[in-house]
Amino acid sequence: MKRKTIALLLALMMCLSLLSACGADSKPDGEPSTATTTPSPTEQPADENKEQPEETEEPAQKPEESEEPAQETHAGTEFLALLQEEWSNGFFEGEGPRHTYNDAVRQPFIYKGVVYMHKVGGSNADFRNSIYSYDIAAKEYKESVSTTLNSSNGNIFFMDGSFYYINVTAPNEIDSKSVRYDCNGELLGSVQQHIGHIFFEKGILRPNYGWGDDLKPGSLWSYELEKIAESPIPQREVEHGLKKDVDMGQDQFFAADGTLYARGYDHFYRLNTDTYQWEDAGDAPQIPDVGIFCGKYATKNGKVFDRVTEEQVFEYGELYPAACGDWADPQLCYFGGDKYLGCKDGEYRWVNLKDLSMSDPLPFPDVHESQLTVLNDTYCVYNDEYGWFLWNYNDGTEETIVLFDK
């Protein structure tokens, strides 16, 4: 009996032990387990009730730069930037993105695909009073503007689609007259005044005129032939603190920086376009009013200078200099926004300032430079004893504008 009792107790203890082991992992719904596991050395235990730190973003990597080589900066690219700024925003003779201005008596020019000329044979009075045109696309030649004004003592200028006949024997004569026409010869306006001949961004300037102590103030006119204001005579200091009028009527003027500059004696003057007063701008630069590269830049002795500051901005070196040369008229210079026309020993080439390279020689007509005018980046015109001719200097083809009557 004793042995049975002991055996029963041992069996009961074993059952209780098994039940305890089987229920260790069981738990009521929603109750977290109390069992723990030992984290590995590289794994930290997660605490669901503890706010986890935000993951720190890695610094954004800079995008890889283009594999294209950076453009080399040199004197050519710096000069190109100056020329592009002047070509886009300055005031210069020729066809540009803002204005087209030309001395129509001095040279032919192109405007919206039409070539305009004044010298086509005949008497001196005829070619001074008439403007002829040649439409390149239509192949049409005609007389566009004709006037009864005797402009042999005056000038003809072109500005943005209008011709201005400035008829005057002397600036202060009572019979002076200024007339404006469109490209087809229609009269747009006239005024019984000499309005001057100096064109710039703000209008047309008639400088002070007269002689010695009898100087008269100048005046500023709009392109519509309306008087804007008088332009007082500038003064310079002389001995004993006195001031004397400056005669700029015979001196050089040029447009730059949206206004006008002029040389009077040994000083430089700048027109204030708000007050219409001339302001003394210091010693006058010694850059001549010739060899004009583009606007305020002039070429001289193998270099290019800023005509306002007298600063050298470029040296040609082995490159062909600008075709106008040091003393030539501007009819040979051409800069169209990205390259310029160079000439050396009668040979013409395009000069690329981005990489300081030059094109092969261009097929120019075999005529003297005085008979030649560059119109744009494709055409030039020239005249000889037989007539006027349009020449494509990129492919060497020619077409006749007009033949002279013999």
Image (cartoon, grey):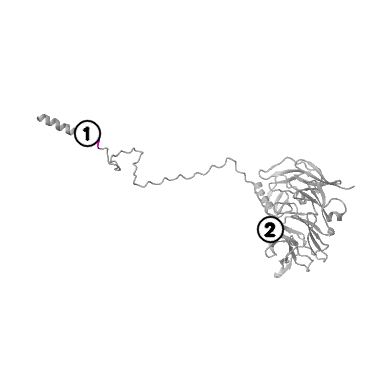
Is disc 2 placed on a helix, strand or loop?
Answer: loop
Q: Which residue is mark 1?
A: 18
Residue 117, relative to residue 169: is it above or below? above
Which segment did they paint magenta? 15-23
Q: Main secondary structure of the magenta part?
A: helix
Residue 253 showing in the rendered view: no
The residue nearer to you, when weighing 351 against 67, is 67
What residue sits 67% from the left and 54% below the top?
Answer: 89
Earlier-in-chain disc, 1 versus 2 = 1
* Residue 18 lies within the magenta run: yes
- Disc nearest the viewer among 1 and 2: 1
Is disc 1 placed on a helix, strand or loop?
Answer: helix
Residue 183, relative to residue 174: is it above or below? above
* Residue type of the residue flagged with mark 1: Leu
Q: Which residue is mark 2?
A: 258
What residue sits 19% from the left and 33% below the top?
Answer: 15
* Residue 92 lies within the magenta run: no
Q: Quadrant of the N terminus?
A: top left
| Residue 36 found in image quarter | top left
| Residue 220 found in image quarter | bottom right
